Image (spheres, grey):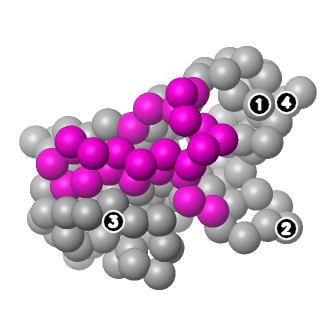
């Protein structure tokens, strides 16, 4: 049974940091590209970052480049998103997603498995 479970969300102040984690099971994690998406109230789900199956290539949305850092541990089947210098516009539900294959991609339609999301709220 496939499971993708996010954790680490919360309420922080602008300028603070937060670390999100994603625990995956039920599929061959090391063969999957992983990604973070987010969805703010009243907005469509948007791409944040993806990392290839080996963890060698990451592709960041422009607005988070330099502030967010993605990593993965294929031995532990975990994905991590370190978020620094958070601002109000980062407020959203953050989703972890998995896509079979090694290449990074920004389209949510290309992702096979999704978690339920974790709420990140940044107060200004």
**Residue 39 shows up from this direction:** yes
119 or 102: nearer the viewer:
102
| Mark 4: secondary structure | strand
- For mark 2, does the 10 Å Cα neighbourhood hold few (<14), some (14 to 19), or many (20 or more) residues? few
For the magenta stretch, what is the residue range? 46-70
Q: Where is residue 110 drawn, in percent x and y?
A: 39, 78
Viewer-nearest of labels 1 and 4?
Answer: 1
Q: Which mark is residue 87?
A: 1
Q: Which mark is residue 98?
A: 3
Question: Do the numbered discs 1 and 4 sit on residues whose CB atoms are within 8 Å?
Answer: no
Q: Where is residue 67 drawn, in percent x and y?
A: 57, 27
Pointer 2 residue: 42
The structure residue drawn at horizontal position 43% and vertical position 69%, both measured from the top left corner, is 114
Of callouts 3 and 4, the N-terminal one = 3
Question: Do the numbered discs 3 and 2 sit on residues whose CB atoms are within 8 Å?
Answer: no
Residue 60, magenta (yes or no): yes
CA distance for labels 1 and 2 = 18 Å
Pointer 4 residue: 123
């Amino acid at each position: 049974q496939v499971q993708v479970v996010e954790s680490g969300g919360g309420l922080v102040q602008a300028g603070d940091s937060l670390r999100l984690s994603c625990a995956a099971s039920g599929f061959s994690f090391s063969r999957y590209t992983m990604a973070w998406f987010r969805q703010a109230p009243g907005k469509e789900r948007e791409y944040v970052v993806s990392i290839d199956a080996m963890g060698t290539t990451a592709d960041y949305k422009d607005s988070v480049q330099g502030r967010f850092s993605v990593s993965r541990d294929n031995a532990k089947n975990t994905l991590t998103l370190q978020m620094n210098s958070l601002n109000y516009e980062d407020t959203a539900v953050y989703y972890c997603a998995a896509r079979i294959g090694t290449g990074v991609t920004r389209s949510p339609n290309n992702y096979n498995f999704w978690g339920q999301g974790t709420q990140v709220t940044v107060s200004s």
